[in-house]
Image (spheres, rainbow, N blue to C red):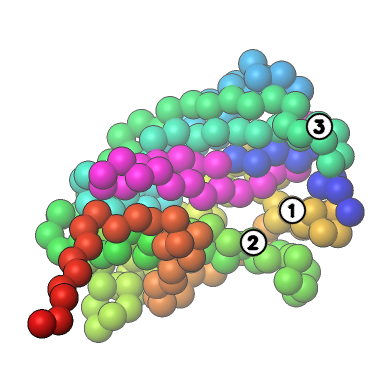
Amino acid sequence: MPRPANVSHAVLVGHLPDGEVFNTGFWLDGPAPITDAEATIFAGQIATRINGSAFLSAAKTLMSADAAYDSVRVYGYATAGAPATGIGEAAIVAGAGTAGTGTGTPLQIALVATLLTASSSRSGRGRMYLPVIAGAQFASHYVIDSSATAVSAGLALLFDALNAGLPSNHVVVMSATHSIVHPVTSVRVDNRADVQRRRANDQAATFTSVSVLT
Protein backbone atom coordinates (compact mmCIF):
# COMPACT_ATOMS: atom_id res chain seq x y z
CA MET A 1 0.00 0.00 0.00
CA PRO A 2 1.25 3.56 -0.63
CA ARG A 3 2.43 6.05 1.92
CA PRO A 4 -0.67 8.00 3.08
CA ALA A 5 -1.25 11.55 1.94
CA ASN A 6 -0.48 14.60 4.05
CA VAL A 7 2.43 13.31 6.11
CA SER A 8 5.82 14.95 6.62
CA HIS A 9 9.15 13.43 7.59
CA ALA A 10 11.27 15.56 9.92
CA VAL A 11 14.88 14.39 9.78
CA LEU A 12 17.57 15.54 12.20
CA VAL A 13 20.85 15.69 10.27
CA GLY A 14 24.25 15.79 11.94
CA HIS A 15 27.88 14.88 11.56
CA LEU A 16 30.28 12.61 13.39
CA PRO A 17 34.09 12.74 13.56
CA ASP A 18 35.84 12.57 10.18
CA GLY A 19 32.81 14.15 8.53
CA GLU A 20 30.48 11.15 8.51
CA VAL A 21 26.84 12.22 8.26
CA PHE A 22 24.05 10.73 10.36
CA ASN A 23 20.31 11.31 10.43
CA THR A 24 17.33 10.23 12.49
CA GLY A 25 13.77 11.43 12.40
CA PHE A 26 10.06 11.21 13.05
CA TRP A 27 6.82 11.70 11.13
CA LEU A 28 4.01 14.21 11.45
CA ASP A 29 0.53 14.01 9.98
CA GLY A 30 -1.59 16.96 8.92
CA PRO A 31 -1.23 19.34 5.98
CA ALA A 32 2.06 18.62 4.23
CA PRO A 33 4.18 21.26 2.48
CA ILE A 34 3.53 21.40 -1.25
CA THR A 35 6.48 23.65 -2.10
CA ASP A 36 10.09 23.88 -0.97
CA ALA A 37 9.33 27.30 0.52
CA GLU A 38 6.56 25.85 2.70
CA ALA A 39 8.80 22.97 3.75
CA THR A 40 11.54 25.42 4.74
CA ILE A 41 9.09 27.32 6.95
CA PHE A 42 7.92 24.05 8.50
CA ALA A 43 11.52 22.98 9.14
CA GLY A 44 12.12 26.31 10.86
CA GLN A 45 9.13 25.83 13.12
CA ILE A 46 10.40 22.42 14.16
CA ALA A 47 13.98 23.65 14.61
CA THR A 48 12.76 26.49 16.84
CA ARG A 49 11.30 23.91 19.23
CA ILE A 50 14.41 21.72 19.10
CA ASN A 51 16.88 24.55 19.73
CA GLY A 52 17.60 24.80 23.45
CA SER A 53 15.22 21.92 24.24
CA ALA A 54 15.72 19.30 26.92
CA PHE A 55 15.88 16.73 24.14
CA LEU A 56 18.77 18.44 22.36
CA SER A 57 20.64 18.87 25.64
CA ALA A 58 20.24 15.16 26.40
CA ALA A 59 21.21 14.08 22.87
CA LYS A 60 24.34 16.25 22.93
CA THR A 61 25.64 14.59 26.10
CA LEU A 62 25.90 11.33 24.13
CA MET A 63 28.45 12.84 21.75
CA SER A 64 31.86 14.45 21.97
CA ALA A 65 32.44 18.01 20.75
CA ASP A 66 33.67 16.85 17.34
CA ALA A 67 30.13 15.75 16.47
CA ALA A 68 26.91 17.76 16.24
CA TYR A 69 23.27 17.96 15.27
CA ASP A 70 23.34 20.42 12.35
CA SER A 71 19.88 20.86 10.86
CA VAL A 72 16.27 19.75 10.50
CA ARG A 73 15.30 18.63 7.01
CA VAL A 74 11.60 18.29 6.18
CA TYR A 75 10.17 16.17 3.38
CA GLY A 76 6.49 16.88 2.75
CA TYR A 77 4.27 14.31 1.07
CA ALA A 78 0.94 15.90 0.16
CA THR A 79 -0.06 13.10 -2.20
CA ALA A 80 -0.32 9.43 -1.27
CA GLY A 81 2.58 7.35 -2.53
CA ALA A 82 4.09 10.22 -4.52
CA PRO A 83 7.57 11.74 -4.24
CA ALA A 84 8.10 14.61 -1.84
CA THR A 85 6.08 17.68 -2.82
CA GLY A 86 8.28 20.00 -0.76
CA ILE A 87 11.76 19.76 0.77
CA GLY A 88 13.17 22.31 3.20
CA GLU A 89 15.87 22.68 5.82
CA ALA A 90 16.59 24.81 8.90
CA ALA A 91 19.64 25.01 11.12
CA ILE A 92 19.90 23.54 14.59
CA VAL A 93 21.64 26.08 16.83
CA ALA A 94 24.39 25.00 19.24
CA GLY A 95 24.01 21.31 18.41
CA ALA A 96 27.61 20.23 19.14
CA GLY A 97 28.25 17.37 21.55
CA THR A 98 29.05 18.28 25.13
CA ALA A 99 30.82 15.14 26.36
CA GLY A 100 34.58 15.11 26.63
CA THR A 101 36.43 13.63 23.68
CA GLY A 102 38.09 10.98 25.87
CA THR A 103 37.67 7.41 24.75
CA GLY A 104 35.37 7.21 21.76
CA THR A 105 33.11 4.38 20.63
CA PRO A 106 32.55 2.93 17.16
CA LEU A 107 30.62 5.43 15.07
CA GLN A 108 27.66 3.11 14.50
CA ILE A 109 26.77 2.78 18.20
CA ALA A 110 23.43 4.38 19.05
CA LEU A 111 20.84 4.77 21.78
CA VAL A 112 17.41 3.72 20.53
CA ALA A 113 14.28 5.68 21.29
CA THR A 114 11.17 3.62 20.56
CA LEU A 115 8.09 5.66 19.70
CA LEU A 116 5.00 3.92 21.04
CA THR A 117 1.37 4.36 20.03
CA ALA A 118 -2.00 2.94 21.02
CA SER A 119 -1.39 0.17 18.48
CA SER A 120 0.60 -2.78 19.81
CA SER A 121 1.42 -4.05 16.32
CA ARG A 122 4.84 -3.67 14.75
CA SER A 123 3.45 -1.00 12.42
CA GLY A 124 2.46 0.99 15.51
CA ARG A 125 6.05 1.47 16.71
CA GLY A 126 8.78 3.73 15.41
CA ARG A 127 12.47 4.11 16.21
CA MET A 128 14.98 6.90 16.40
CA TYR A 129 18.71 6.13 16.59
CA LEU A 130 20.78 8.68 18.50
CA PRO A 131 24.57 8.41 18.14
CA VAL A 132 26.51 7.51 21.29
CA ILE A 133 30.17 8.19 20.58
CA ALA A 134 31.32 9.32 24.02
CA GLY A 135 32.86 6.43 25.95
CA ALA A 136 32.13 8.18 29.25
CA GLN A 137 28.44 7.51 28.61
CA PHE A 138 28.91 3.82 29.41
CA ALA A 139 28.92 2.14 32.81
CA SER A 140 29.44 -1.63 32.92
CA HIS A 141 28.85 -1.74 29.15
CA TYR A 142 25.43 -0.07 29.36
CA VAL A 143 24.53 3.55 28.68
CA ILE A 144 24.16 5.48 31.91
CA ASP A 145 20.58 5.16 33.18
CA SER A 146 20.22 8.91 33.70
CA SER A 147 21.09 9.53 30.04
CA ALA A 148 18.39 7.12 28.86
CA THR A 149 15.89 8.88 31.14
CA ALA A 150 16.93 12.31 29.90
CA VAL A 151 16.51 11.31 26.24
CA SER A 152 13.12 9.71 26.88
CA ALA A 153 11.77 12.66 28.85
CA GLY A 154 13.29 15.18 26.45
CA LEU A 155 11.73 13.57 23.39
CA ALA A 156 8.33 13.40 25.07
CA LEU A 157 8.55 17.11 25.91
CA LEU A 158 9.62 17.94 22.36
CA PHE A 159 6.73 15.99 20.85
CA ASP A 160 4.30 17.68 23.27
CA ALA A 161 5.67 21.06 22.19
CA LEU A 162 5.26 20.19 18.51
CA ASN A 163 1.73 18.88 19.02
CA ALA A 164 0.73 22.01 20.94
CA GLY A 165 2.64 24.55 18.86
CA LEU A 166 1.72 23.13 15.45
CA PRO A 167 -1.97 22.36 16.02
CA SER A 168 -2.57 21.20 12.46
CA ASN A 169 0.24 18.62 12.68
CA HIS A 170 0.90 15.85 15.20
CA VAL A 171 3.82 13.49 15.78
CA VAL A 172 2.95 10.02 14.52
CA VAL A 173 4.34 6.67 13.53
CA MET A 174 3.75 6.21 9.82
CA SER A 175 3.25 2.78 8.28
CA ALA A 176 3.66 2.71 4.52
CA THR A 177 2.84 -1.01 4.61
CA HIS A 178 -0.66 -0.33 5.90
CA SER A 179 -0.99 3.27 4.63
CA ILE A 180 -1.88 4.53 8.10
CA VAL A 181 -0.56 6.75 10.88
CA HIS A 182 -0.73 6.28 14.65
CA PRO A 183 -0.25 9.22 17.08
CA VAL A 184 2.77 8.78 19.34
CA THR A 185 1.67 8.37 22.96
CA SER A 186 4.97 7.65 24.74
CA VAL A 187 8.70 7.26 24.24
CA ARG A 188 10.70 4.30 25.57
CA VAL A 189 14.49 4.32 25.91
CA ASP A 190 16.44 1.54 27.59
CA ASN A 191 20.13 1.56 28.48
CA ARG A 192 21.24 -1.08 25.96
CA ALA A 193 23.13 0.49 23.10
CA ASP A 194 22.37 -0.83 19.63
CA VAL A 195 24.23 -0.92 16.34
CA GLN A 196 23.02 0.93 13.27
CA ARG A 197 23.74 -1.91 10.90
CA ARG A 198 23.37 0.17 7.75
CA ARG A 199 26.08 2.54 8.96
CA ALA A 200 28.24 -0.36 10.11
CA ASN A 201 27.98 -1.95 6.68
CA ASP A 202 28.79 1.32 4.91
CA GLN A 203 31.67 2.34 7.15
CA ALA A 204 35.04 1.95 5.44
CA ALA A 205 38.19 1.04 7.32
CA THR A 206 40.79 3.80 7.52
CA PHE A 207 43.65 1.36 8.01
CA THR A 208 44.34 -2.28 7.10
CA SER A 209 47.28 -4.45 8.09
CA VAL A 210 48.24 -7.68 6.31
CA SER A 211 51.01 -9.89 7.70
CA VAL A 212 52.51 -12.67 5.59
CA LEU A 213 53.66 -15.95 7.13
CA THR A 214 57.26 -16.94 6.49
As drawn, the residue found furthest toward the top would be 37
Q: Quadrant of residue 65?
A: top left
Quadrant location of the N terminus in the rendered image:
bottom right
- Tag 3 near tag 2, CB within 8 Å: no
Q: Secondary structure at mark 3?
A: loop
Vertical placement of residue 145 versus 44, above or below: below
Q: Residue shown at 30%/35% (left/top)?
A: 94
Which label belongs to residue 174? 1
Q: Is residue 13 magenta?
A: yes
Give whichever of discs 3 and 2 has the lower sequence position: 3
**Residue 126 tag number:** 2
Query: Farthest right residue?
Result: 1
What percent of the width, then of the height, locates residue 59?
Answer: 37, 53
Q: Look at the picture and state if 212 lies above or below 45.
A: below
The spot of residue 199 in percent (x, y) is: 45, 57
Q: Which mark is residue 28?
A: none
Q: Is residue 124 left or right of residue 94?
A: right
Kind of residue indicated by mark 1: Met
Among all residues in the image, which is located at the extreme front?
214
Specify start and end residues of the magenta stretch as a single range: 11-33
- Is 38 displayed left or right of 128 in the figure? right
Q: Residues within 10 Å of mark 1 (few under 14, many from 20)?
A: many
What amino acid does circle 2 point to?
Answer: Gly
**Amino acid type shown at disc 3:** Ala
Report x, y in % for residue 175. Answer: 77, 57
Query: Which residue was labeled with disc 3?
Result: 78
Q: Secondary structure at mark 2?
A: strand
At a point 54% along the width and 69% down the height, the residue shown is 188
* Secondary structure predominantly adopted by residues drawn in magenta: strand
Q: Is residue 90 above or below residue 23?
A: above
